[in-house]
Image: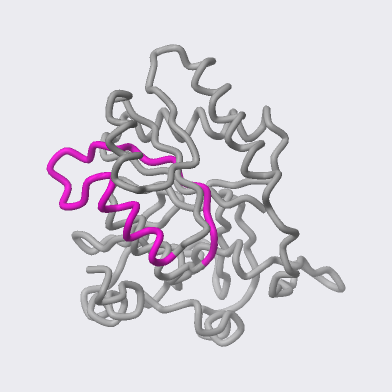
Amino acid sequence: MLNIIVCDDDAFTLRLVTSLLKTAIEKSAAKARLSCIASSGMEVLNFIANSPGSYLYFLDFDFGKEELNGIDLVKRIYLKDPNGKIVFVTSHSEKAMDILRSGIRAFGFIDKTPEQEKMISEYVKYLRMASAQEAPAASLPMIRLPLGIDETAALPLSDIIYVDSVKSMAHSICYHTFDGSEITVRDTIEHALELLGSNFIRCHRSVLVNKQYVISLKNGLLKLSNGETVTCAMGKRKEVAAACFKKEEL
C-alpha cells in the first residue's frame, strides 16, 4: 500500500488538491490511500512521529508565515522518513532550482494550475512511479467485531481512526475507519480499549482515538489525519498531548 501525505496551508487549495488526488488514485489504479491531510508542517511532523513509515508527500513549498518553510520542513521529514518521496506542488516553479541547490532531494515538482486535468495527470504519473518502488506490505494486526449470531467482521487496527459511543443505541459503540466506513457493534468503550491496545487513547468518556492519526489539538478538538475532528475533554488534554505529540516535534 502506498501511503500519501498532502500538505497545504490554504484551506481551499488543500480541499482541491485532496479531491484531485483521490481522482488520480482511481485513474492510476494504484494501491494507495491518503494517510494524512495536513494544513501545516507541524501537523505533518506530528503525524510521522506517531506513524513511522515511508510516505509519498505532496507538499506546498511556501507556507507563508509558517515557522517552517518547504526546505526546513523536508529536512526534518527526512530525519524521520529517510526514504520518503517528496513532490513539491507549487505556484512558484522558479523556486525549484533553489530547492535543488539546497541539497534537498525531490521526487518531483508539480505546477499549480487551473487546468485540473493536467494536475491529475501529474499526480497519476508520480503515483505510478512511487507504486513501482513499493515493497509488498506485511500482514496487518486485525480485530474481529461481532456483527450478529455467528457473524464477524475482520478489521485491520490501522484502519480504525476512532471509536465512539452510539447515543441512540444502548450499549453500542461505532468503529470509524480511515476511509469513512462505520461499523456499529454492541460493546462498551472500556472493553474496546482493552481490545485495541496501546495505539489507542481515551480522549473523552465516550471516545477512543488512534494516536497515530492525531495531528493537532486546538480548542478542545483533536484534528485527525483524514481531516475529521473529535472532542477532547478538558481533563484529558494534557494526557492526550503528551501521548500524541513528541516533545522534539513541538
Q: Residue furthest right?
A: 150
Q: Quadrant of residue 111?
A: top left
Tell whether position 58 is magenta: yes
Residue drawn at (75%, 59%), measured in percent from left and top? 136
Nearer to the camera, 47 or 201 = 47
Q: Residue furthest left?
A: 65
Nearer to the camera, 112 or 217 = 112
214 in relation to 10, above or below: below
Q: How is the image coloured?
A: one colour
Nearer to the camera, 130 or 208 = 130
Residue 202 percent coordinates (x, y): 40, 78
Q: Quadrant of the C terminus?
A: bottom left
Nearer to the camera, 203 or 44 = 44
* The magenta segment: 53-80
Q: Quadrant of residue 184?
A: bottom right
Residue 20 percent coordinates (x, y): 51, 28
Residue 116 percent coordinates (x, y): 48, 16
Image mark count: 0
Residue drawn at (53%, 46%), measured in percent from left and top? 34
86 left or right of 247 in image:
right
Residue 7 percent coordinates (x, y): 36, 43
Residue drawn at (56%, 34%), measured in percent from left and top? 22
Tell whether position 144 is magenta: no
28 in relation to 224, above or below: above
